[in-house]
Amino acid sequence: MKGFIMINIEPGTEKAVHDSLVKIKGISEVVPVYGERDFIAIADVESIADLNRAVLSIREINGITYTQTILGMELKF
C-alpha cells in the first residue's frame, strides 16, 4: 500500500527534516515541492499499521508543523 504524506516545515529546517525523513522505515522517497506543502514523503508499506507508525514518526521530527496523509488506491480492471 502506498501513502502520500504532505508535509509543511519551519523555514530553515529543510536539510534536517529531509535527513530525518529518509531514515524512517517505510518511506521510499522524499520529494521537496513548490506550492502549499514543502515535502511529500512517499510510504510504501505492507499495512495500515505500518503507515501509521511511519506517520507518527514523521510527526515527531523537529521542524515539522503540519502533515496530511493520502492513501493510494488500487484500481482493479
Image (cartoon, grey):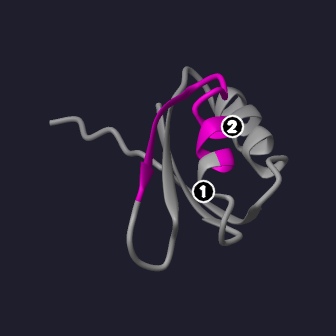
Q: Nearer the viewer, residue 13 or 3?
A: 13
In the picture as drawn, the residue positioned furthest to the bottom comes out as 36
Query: Is-magenta flag for residue 72?
Result: no
Left or right: 69 as drawn, with respect to 63: left
Quadrant assignment for the C terminus = top left
* Residue at 68% in and 27% down: 50
Q: Residues within 10 Å of mark 2 (few under 14, many from 20)?
A: few
In the picture as drawn, the residue positioned furthest to the left comes out as 77
- The amino acid type of the residue labelled 2 equals Ser
Question: Over which residues does the magenta segment extend?
Answer: 16-32
User: In the rendered image of this protein, does residue 48 appear above or below residue 61?
Assistant: above
The location of residue 17, given as percent across then percent down, is: 67, 48
The location of residue 43, given as percent across then percent down, is: 52, 35
* Numbered label attached to residue 20: 2
* Residue at 71% in and 70% down: 10
Q: Nearer the viewer, residue 3 or 24?
A: 24
Q: Earlier in the sequence, mark 2 or mark 1?
A: 1
- The amino acid type of the residue labelled 1 equals Glu
